[in-house]
Image: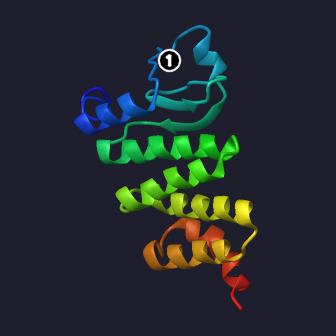
Amino acid sequence: MNAVAFPDPAVVDFVTNNMIPLRIPADDPELGPRFKVKWTPTLLILDADGIEHYRTLGFYPPDELIPALLMGMGKASFNRPDRSAACAYFEQIRASYPASSLAPEAVYLDGVSRYIETHDAANLIGIFDRLAADYPDSPWLTRADPYRLLKK
C-alpha cells in the first residue's frame, strides 16, 4: 500500500480530512491478537471506542481504497445508528465511484438504511431496480431479488 495507494494525493487528502490513521505492526503483541490480524495489509475502521465496523484485507488501488474507506465509515454510521450519515457515505460511493466493486453494496445498504428510517417499501424496491439497471451481474442483486416481489 505504501508504494501505490497511500502516497496517492487523493488518498492522502481523504484520510487527512476524514480519519485518524494509525499504523500498527501485524505482530504487535497486544493489538494484533485483539483485532485478529492474520495478514497484511489489514485496514480496520473503528469507532471512538475501538469497536470494529469494517475490515479490508489485501492491497487496494487508490480508486478502490477511498470507496472502501467510505464503506467503513458508512457501516460505522449505520451501526451507531445514524442512518442519514450512513446514507450520505453510501451515496458518495455510488455517485463518485460508480465503477467501484463496492458500489452495488452501497446501493443495497443505502436502500436498507432508508427503509429502516421510513418503513417505506419503495426503498427496498428501489434497491432491486437500481441494482438491476446498474449492476445486473452483482451478487447484491441476488440478495435484493425478494424486493422485486414488493412491486404492485
Q: Position of residue 25 (x, y in %)?
A: 47, 14
- Residue at the far top: name it: 29
Q: In which quarter of the image is the N terminus?
A: top left
Task: State which quadrant residue 143 falls in.
Answer: bottom right
56 sits to left or right of 34? left
- What's the colour scheme? rainbow
Q: Can see residue 96?
A: yes
Q: Where is residue 66 in the image (x, y as percent from the top left)?
A: 38, 43
Q: What element carries label 1?
A: loop
- Residue at the far right: name it: 119
The relative height of residue 94 versus residue 147 in the rendered view (above or below) is: above
118 sits to left or right of 127? right
> Residue at 45% across / 27% down in the picture?
40
Task: State which quadrant residue 36 falls in.
Answer: top right
The relative height of residue 37 versus residue 110 in the rendered view (above or below) is: above
Residue closest to the eye, 68 or 28: 68
- Identify the residue position indicated by label 1 in the image: 26
The relative height of residue 20 versus residue 113 in the rendered view (above or below) is: above
Q: In which quarter of the image is the C terminus?
A: bottom right
Q: Can see residue 97?
A: no
18 sits to left or right of 30? left
> Residue at 72% across / 83% down in the picture?
150
> Residue at 44% across / 23% down in the picture?
21
Q: Position of residue 35 (x, y in %)?
A: 62, 23
- Residue at the far bottom: name it: 152
Give the residue type at disc 1.
Ala
Tag 1: Cα neighbours inside 10 Å, few (<14), some, or many (≥20)?
some
> Residue at 72% across / 75% down in the picture?
121
Task: State which quadrant residue 127 falls in.
Answer: bottom right
